[in-house]
Image (cartoon, helix red, strand yellow):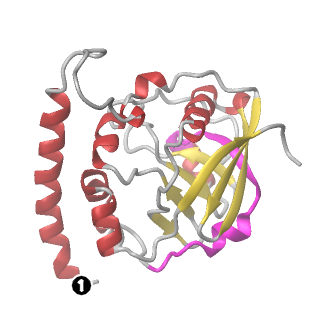
Amino acid sequence: MKKSSVRPRFSRVLTSLAILTIAVSCGGEAGEQTEGPQPNPLMQPENFSATAPDTYVARLETTKGVIRIQVTKEWAPLAADRFFNLVSGGYYDGVTFHRVIDGFMAEFGIHGEPWVNAFWRQATMDDEPVRKPNTRGRVSFSKNEPNTRTVQVFINTDENRSLDGQGFSPFGEVIEGMDVVGALYSEYGESPTRGGEGVYPAMAIARGDDYLNEEFPLLDRIERAMIEDGGEG
């Protein structure tokens, strides 16, 4: 990928984000009845409101193998509930690991459908106390500023305790499949906003899989995500 491609992408993402913002703001009142096909359930974040069990296991079937994440609600209740709803609601099915940095983390959560991203960008969660450190295998929601967690999640692949002071609150940990996490495709590197030539998150949010498949075809994906019964086993 050539560095000269970064600036045209930036221009395209501004246009795409502007269109999505206008469309969402003109979407009508919540619950408004319209004729025609029913909206995609994933574009209704307000319905993802089930209460998660105190502990549960999320199973991610990826293009590299299975990853199982044990979630402990006591660590970060809001995050545990949100992750439970996203997994059980099918949000992560088909989602890419869009940012994989060796010796740091593997991140996922940008949906392949731009309209879905547009709605979830508004479904922010308040920050929670950091009750457990961001050590290898721990899982946290990502954010750019305080109280902006939504759907993107990262798995720590090293001892990242520096993230604790930045307010990243682990809500679970990998109990099976850290070898799978380590095998996820990482050659694209960091995003242009961090000096690399990897996935531009804003562009991925605005264009979804059209952008990811065109520019980053080797990214690994979550083929299917589900909630397993019981705890660690």
Q: Residue at x 29, y 68 (%)?
A: 192
Name which residue lies at 41% across and 36% down.
Answer: 42
The reply, left or right, for residue 155 in relation to residue 195 is right
The residue identified by callout 1 is 2
Residue 119's spot in the image, x, y percent? 31, 34
Q: Is residue 193 visible?
A: no
Q: Residue 100 in the image: x percent, y percent?
A: 51, 67
Up the image or down, 59 lies above or below 151; here it is below
Quadrant including the N terminus: bottom left
The answer to whether residue 188 is left or right of residue 200 is right
Q: Residue furthest front?
A: 36
Based on the picture, tell me whether residue 228 belongs to the magenta stretch.
no
Question: Percent position (x, y) of residue 155?
Answer: 61, 56
Q: Which of 38/117 is in front?
A: 38
Please provide percent x and percent y for residue 225. Answer: 61, 49
- Secondary structure at badge 1 equals loop
Q: Which residues are magenta?
A: 165-187
